[in-house]
Image (cartoon, grey):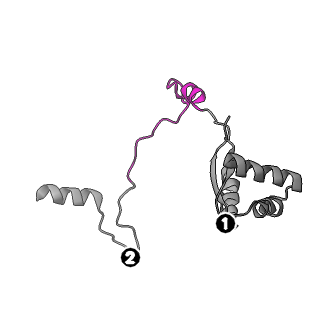
Amino acid sequence: MAVVAQLVERWLVVPDVAGSSPVDRPIERPVVAAIGDAGTGLDERLDTDLTVAPDVPWVTIVWNDPVNLMNYVARVFRTYFGLPAAKAERLMLLVHHEGKAVVATGPRELMERHTEAMHEFGLWASIAKADT
């Protein structure tokens, strides 16, 4: 019990004046050496460990389905992606004959939006990393 009383007496101060702080002094913390200080060697190791990976492109793939007509799929490609009629027709034929076609390439977020839009048009679509 005496130990607890000594700790309380050491860390707390009974205020004599109204409004004064009951804390005697702030707690002092040890100073931690900053990264790159002389003699630590951390700055050299950090410079060699950090690498930036390039942004990998993603693709939107439209899959063949037994529901939608070929002229509807070509019309969706023309209206949504703004493709010329010949390119929309070629992509539609790829979907029909090969089972799938890559209709857009770009950042992941944009490809996710394109995939959702294809779903709203009733087409089967997915997103995948582009082959590099």
**Residue located farthest toward the left when viewing the structure as drawn:** 1
- Give the image location of residue 106, x and y in percent: 73, 48
Q: In which quarter of the image is residue 80?
A: bottom right
Q: What stretch is highlighted in magenta?
A: 27-50
The quadrant in which the N terminus is found is bottom left
Q: Which of 116 and 32 is in front in this view?
A: 116
9 on left or right of 110: left
What kind of element bears circle 1? loop
Q: Where is residue 118 in the image (x, y as percent from the top left)?
A: 69, 62
Name the main secondary structure of what is drawn in magenta.
loop
Q: In this view, does 99 lie to the left or right of 90?
A: left
Could you tell me which residue is drawn at 77 percent across and 53 percent down?
92
Relative image position of residue 71 (x, y in whole percent): 79, 62
Q: Residue at x 39, y 48 (%)?
A: 28
Horizontal arrangement in the rendering, residue 5 relative to residue 99 (left or right): left
Helix, strand or loop at mark 2: loop
Res. 18 mark: 2
Per the rendering, the mark at residue 2 is none
Does residue 18 lie above or below 109 as drawn? below
Numbered circles on residues, count = 2
Q: Nearer the viewer, residue 61 or 24?
A: 61
Residue 5 visible? The answer is: yes
| Residue neighbourhood size for the residue with mark 2, other residues' Cα within 10 Å, grouped as few (<14), some (14–19), many (≥20) | few
**Residue at which label 1 appears:** 122
